Image (tube, rainbow, N blue to C red):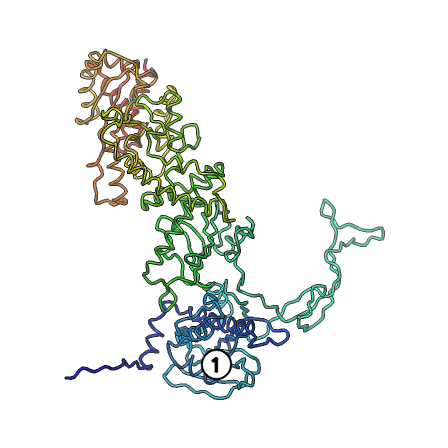
Amino acid sequence: MTTRTGSLSINSENMLPIIKKWLYSDHDIFAREVVANGCDAISKLHKLEIMGEYTYPEGHKDSITVITDPESKTLKFIDTGLGMTAEEVEEYITQIAFSGATAFLEKYKDKTNKDDIIGHFGLGFYSVFMVAENVEIDTLSYREGATPVHWECDGSSEYQIGDGTRTEVGTEITLHLGEDSIEFANKYRMQEVLEKYCSFMPVEIYLKNAQQEYETIDESDLRDTDVVVERIHEDAKYQDEYDEKGYAKLDENGNIIKKEISPARDRVKINRRLVSISDIHPLWTKHPNECTDEEYRAFYRKVFNDYREPLFWIHLNMDYPFNLKGIIYFPKINTEYDSIEGTIKLYNNQVFIADNIKEVIPEYMMLLKGVIDCPDFPLNVSRSALQNDGFVKKISDYISKKIADKLSGMCKTDRGNYEKYWDDISPFIKYGCLKDEKFNERMKDFMLYKDLEGKYLTLQEYLDKVADEGGHADSAVKSEELDIDEETTAEAKADAGADGSEPGEGAGDAAAAEADGDSAESVAGDSETAGEDSDTGEAPEEPKQTTVYYVTDEVQQSQYIKMFRDQGLDAVILRHNIDSAYISHVERDNENVHFVRIDADVNGSVREEASEEELKADTEKLGELFKKAVGKDKLTVKVEKLKDESISSVLTLSEEGRRMQDMMRMYSSGSSDMDLSMFAPDETLVLNANNELVRYLLDNPASEHAETFCSQLYDLAALSNRPLKAEDMTKFLQRSNEIMLLLSKK
């Protein structure tokens, strides 16, 4: 067979069913497509008017009107755009996938901005056949002497076209709805659809019923454009007056005194005024300097129906290397009750595309609420989702950077508010640091830790504070020993808001890039002398290991906190589940910093110096006694002399073992299939030799009540560490009653 070339043949009879059934996931999206086409027609006519190819008639107003008619089961879309000739109808409507927008842009490519035109695929119109059994188009072109055109199609591959009756420039599309789509002939259902997809279209959109609706207003509020149906005079309204006892008040003639509650007034009945569904100048299209805080809050309430104040927001405004505008809000979230998933609305030229596009918003920022409008988004044919494109990753990186800039800028220039918001936003920022190394590099110097006094400090501020106050017995490091970017923390406050955005928006863009370069150079320089001191040739000293103690539950661990405070020691509070993974991440970045929960060990500062031989003997004496009493052969028992004589026993858990158990608990997600006890951390029961009860057990190990005291001391120590299991709590309560009964008999 000889080689030959040919062209693929596409049968429209097979194409239409595919478009109707598979192109769009939601049937109500047809409204967006038809309205978007109307917006394009109006934008094109506006461009032609600017270029001098058309003159608007007097009183012209750009608009799209949607008319519902439940009686005739029809839905109309009427635009004031440029209209079409018969030839254009056959070219743009009857040729599937032929884009009138693309043809217009090609013709006027040197005179118009492509970002002002919405459509590009030429398939949107056919979405109407998802809901309509028959579609009619009546249109009149802007061209001088143009003849009105009527086009009709029942969804098959055949159509009828001829002269129409329309007298005004523009297009009217009538959908004869199918039985399963009659809902769209209901005005309130269509209002819901239009508000979903068209709230911010660049053209005013009006919705009304085919049957005329009326409203009554005061005559003083009458406008020249109102159509008056009836004038109404309302007499004044009165009601009887009553005294404190409930009796009607009487005048001197014995008549009931009446009080005027509504004065006489003249009113008029008019055709209901149409109110535009679309906000043609949404807040994100304005420059940040033009927006007030109240406007940002009002926009948040309107779009997300959330009447709690957002914590703060970021106004995105970028023209290069891609066009992107938007507003990102940090909402106030009650993590105990609320879903942590936010809502990011994606728009293309003010046309709604979809919610929560995970390719655009970094995963760790999905709690946020906001809107993003980008004409450059690579949309699929249905304009309902993004195509997988490297360009989208750049947008995602940009948003991540702007969020980091906002947060770091706030920390530097508005520390008070940053600290106020920290407890709400910290879990998600920490998650971001774990998921995105670039985000971590930008934020690591601005992560806050709350100490026992309630003060918020960066890690270095905390370590410097501990070192200056005498520190923990384990030592503390100064700034130069910790892997923290000093240049970033010293950036000038003027960096924040340099582009007129919210404080932090745009802050540090150049500085971050410079800091990245400096960091790489610094690391490389250090590596040359890492093996030995450049002056002496001797190996440098190992940096001191610093222990940062932390608390996860101030109530449960109150005994340990008291011991620390009594000795002038400090700790940081880490309540969230993600903190376990995050501190491991910090330890990886800073090898000389080690986090230890406050109950993982008895700090040297709370112990007295004592003879090791004496403590060893006491430990051997009580070790077996306690193991037998509590039934734990693997329990480690130690006797120490604690400075606080009122403390009898303390239970400590190994840090590594407890972190492993926490990690497995998180991975199991509450699954009953995994036995977490196999990951239980090693327990050490520390007994205070300075406590009278412990001294009693040392002196009377054979007492008939020794085992009771041992079990009680263990449970008391455990209660300061964790909740008791149900069975253990029952035994503890019974034992407590027995001990009180013994005391009552003395």
x then y, percent, for residue 589: 30, 37
Residue at image position (49%, 63%) is 195
Q: Dot 1 corresponds to which residue?
A: 137
At mark 1, the secondary structure is: strand
Residue 146 left/right relative to 122: right
Which three-letter amino acid code belongs to the residue tagged 1? Answer: Ile
Name the residue at 40% across, 48% down.
Answer: 401
Asked if residue 733 shows in the view, the reply is no
Q: Residue furthest bottom?
A: 162
The reply, left or right, for residue 7 in relation to residue 466 is left
Residue 546 can be seen, yes or no: yes
- Which of the image's four quarters has the N terminus? bottom left
- Asked where in the image residue 4 lies, by quadrant, the reply is bottom left
Q: Give the image location of residue 386, x and y in percent.
A: 36, 62
Q: In the displayed image of the protein, which residue is found farthest to the left?
A: 1
To which quarter of the image does residue 651 belong?
top left
Q: In the displayed structure, would residue 196 be above or below residue 259? A: below
Give the image location of residue 226, x and y in percent: 66, 70
Q: Is residue 734 above or below residue 261?
A: above
Of residues 276 and 506, the one drawn nearer to the viewer in this rendering: 506
Q: Residue furthest right?
A: 253
Left or right relative to 471: residue 703: left
Front residue of this view, candidates 697 and 41: 41
Pick the front one: 34 or 115: 115
Q: Quadrant of residue 488?
A: top left
The C terminus - image quarter: top left
- Residue 166, horizontal then vertical, whole percent: 55, 83
Q: Residue at x 43, y 39 (%)?
A: 422
Establish if 40 lies above or below 333: below
Query: Neighbour class for label 1 at 10 Å: few (<14), some, many (≥20)?
Result: many
